[in-house]
Image (cartoon, rainbow, N blue to C red):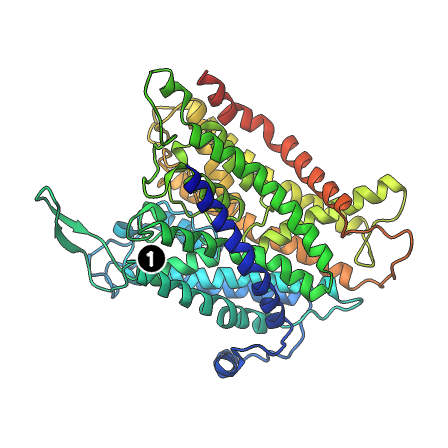
Amino acid sequence: MNTEISGVILMYALVIVIAIPLGKYIGKVFSNESTWPDRLFNPIDRAFYKLAGVDPSRQMTWKQHLLSLLTINLVWFILGMFVLMNMSWLPLNPDGNPSMGADLAFNTVTSFICNTNLQHYSGETGMSYLGQLVLMLFQFISAASGISIAAVLFTAMKERTTTQLGNAYFLFVRTCTRILFPVALITAFLLLLNGTPMTFEGKDTITSIQGDTVQVSRGPVAAFVPIKHLGTNGGGFFGPNSAHPLENPNYITDIIEMVAQMIIPVALIFTLGYILKRRRFAWMIFGVMTIGFLLLVVPTIINEVNGNPAISRMGIAQPLGNMEGKEVRFGPAASAYWSIATTVISTGSINSMHDSFMPLSGMNQLLGMMVNCFYGGVGVGLMNFYIFIILAVFISGLMVGRTPEFMGKKIEAREMKIAMIIALLHPLLILAGTAIASHLYAGNPETYAGWLNNPGYHGFSEMLYEFTSSSANNGSGFEGLGDNTPFWNIACGIVMMMARYLPIIGPIAIAGSLAAKKYIPESAGTLKTDTSTFGLMIFAVIAIVAALSFFPALALGPIAEYFSLY
């Protein structure tokens, strides 16, 4: 067990060691400063600009940035629908997998464009290699969209008074060529060295030790897995995701994938500090996020290492802890750590089945997504945190009787209305969706019997988790839920779309509005936002919003299930 804990500490330490210099590098990329890959990638960047017919030097307002983002996503959405609904006759389908129906294709394309990667299908049977490659492309696009729009937020916070916030295409292309592609290439090479397959051949026929003939799915897995983690996408090439031995062969690949999914969300915190020239402010944000992360991950590891009390009362020893739904090669500690990291940063990939975790561990996974700003997904995690900063500044201003100011700009009614709408949108989508699903199931359980394998408290948690995962752009699931139905495909698709774009539009609208205002120099009465005191204020706001919004639902699900074990 000490070895397992050491492995967890090593994973987190590697993230910090890599994220700090990576954050500075990303800051240079966004600021158009000289970096070592310029000689290689500058011609590639220019080729993309020429092909697209765009001028990367043209400045844009925040509205133009958002229009560019939505246009890019719409074009790829249409292409994705065509490919997934016609896979059966399109090329690169050696296993003869069928095309998707309209509702499943809508859910899948929406999911990957929105950086959620919720999968109501199993990749090895429900997707051709062409479909997988298109989804892999979407993983670059959705991640680059989130990172590049975060760069707009950073620029708006940096400038004193302006409406010009850089160029969307410049930021998008550089995010792909200078950040995502190089790191994905290195990660893919490391996975290849450790046995992850990379082939376009169909299923392989092998003979097991028992003498059985088995058809084993394979494919371009080593190319797919790196970007799913680096972009906090999370979609699995295979149904079991990173619990699959070809997607995550050993403990070394587990460390690689764990580090890969955390480095960019953490690095962007230090990018913010570099661009704003406010390193103390960045460390304050990092401290608040890390405290929240540890408050979720430590109890979860303890819960899983200690095992299931109901099994202990039967006189059955659990020397390895709660191993239901977990891989022996990873163990309960590394699996528990992954489960919180992947829900906190909205990756949604798994190396164990979240449905089989202890009730309070499941609650912590839910809380990571409900809060949705402890590190968060690439780019959007900081935008969600920005909303809580605005709320904390406003509340702090009211407490001391001063007009709220942030980065030298007055926060007024317009900004607060947008912030409150975005803060309340997340619980609205989760709780309203869960309420509708619960009403349908309770009103006609025979018709919807295929939804839940576990009625009762855990069944409620399964439905709550699905909408929470959709709203948090996460993509993981309590897989006791039968989710490939028109209701779940369409409902989750709508939730994913609203939860992706409105929380991007809101923070950028606030930042654009503040950037256009007159700059007010700091004075003796200016609220210091880079102190531990203000950090505690932000944490209190986050905790209060999460507690008031979600505690009743959690009490009906994982908390009630926990007490049923005793």
Horizontal side of residue 305 vs 34, given as left or right: left
Q: Is residue 436 above or below residue 337?
A: above
Residue 537 x %, y %: 75, 41
- What crowding class fits label 1: few (fewer than 14 Cα within 10 Å), some (14-19), or many (20 or more)? many
Visible residue check, residue 336: yes
Residue 535: % across, % down? 72, 45
Tell me the element at label 1: helix
**Number of numbered discs visible in the structure rendering:** 1
Q: Residue at x 51, y 83 (%)?
A: 39
Residue 366 in view, yes or no: no
Q: Amino acid at mark 1?
A: Leu
Of all residues shown, which one is farthest toward the front? Answer: 2
In the picture provided, is 428 more to the left or to the right than 273? Answer: left
| x and y percentages locating residue 16 in the rendered image | 56, 55
Q: Residue at x 58, y 64 (%)?
A: 21
Q: Nearer the viewer, residue 292 or 391?
A: 292
**In this view of the protein, which residue sits in the foreground, 62 or 316?**
316
Question: Which residue is labeled 1 in the image?
Answer: 84
Foreground: 73 or 400? 400
Residue depicted at 30% across the width and 47% down the height:
244
